């Protein structure tokens, strides 16, 4: 309203320039399918970003961490009771 009263017209405000995303979902999916055992740190180094960013994008893509129960309870040891 203030702009209309002062200038007689309303101009469209400029939007912020949005930076392009560092992590391309297609490239991330390709990296995971080629090397499924890679860690978040390795993937983050590939994209030159932080591991938390990779974790965010993996969760967004509904890709969960690898669940491997190769260590049996006998090898792991018993839990201490307090």
Image (cartoon, grey):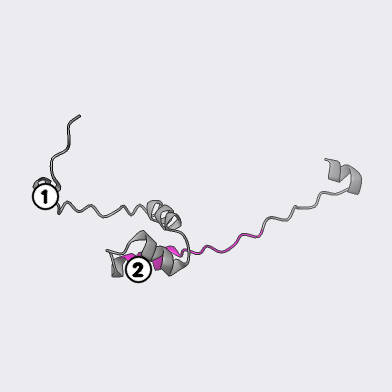
| Residue 21 belongs to the span the image colors magenta | yes
Q: Is residue 39 left or right of residue 21?
A: left
Write down the region rendered in magenta: 17-32
**Residue drawn 61% across and 59% down?**
18
Q: Is residue 79 above or below residue 57?
A: above
Q: Is residue 6 left or right of residue 74?
A: right
**Residue drawn 41% across and 52% down?**
60
Split into 4 quadrants, where in the image is the N terminus? Answer: top right
Q: Nearer the viewer, residue 31 or 9?
A: 31
- The image quadrant of residue 54 is bottom left
Q: Are marks 1 and 2 in contact (CB under 8 Å)?
A: no
Disc 1 residue crowd, few under 14, some 14–19, many 20+, Cα 10 Å:
few
Image depth: mark 1 or mark 2 in front: 1
Disc 2 residue crowd, few under 14, some 14–19, many 20+, Cα 10 Å:
some
**Residue drawn 90% across and 45% down?**
6
Q: Position of residue 40 (x, y in %)?
A: 37, 59
SS class, disc 1: helix
- Disc 2 designates what residue? 31
Split into 4 quadrants, where in the image is the C terminus? Answer: top left
Q: Position of residue 56 (x, y in %)?
A: 43, 53
- Disc 1 designates what residue? 75
Q: Nearer the viewer, residue 62 or 72?
A: 72
Q: Position of residue 61 (x, y in %)?
A: 38, 55
């Amino acid at each position: 309203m203030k702009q209309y009263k002062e200038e007689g017209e309303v101009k469209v405000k400029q939007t912020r320039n949005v930076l392009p995303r560092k992590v391309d979902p297609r490239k991330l999916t390709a990296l995971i399918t080629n090397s499924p055992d890679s860690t978040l740190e390795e993937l983050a180094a590939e994209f030159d970003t932080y591991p938390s960013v990779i974790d965010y994008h993996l969760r967004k893509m509904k890709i969960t961490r690898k669940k491997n129960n190769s260590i049996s309870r006998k090898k792991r040891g018993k839990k201490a009771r307090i």
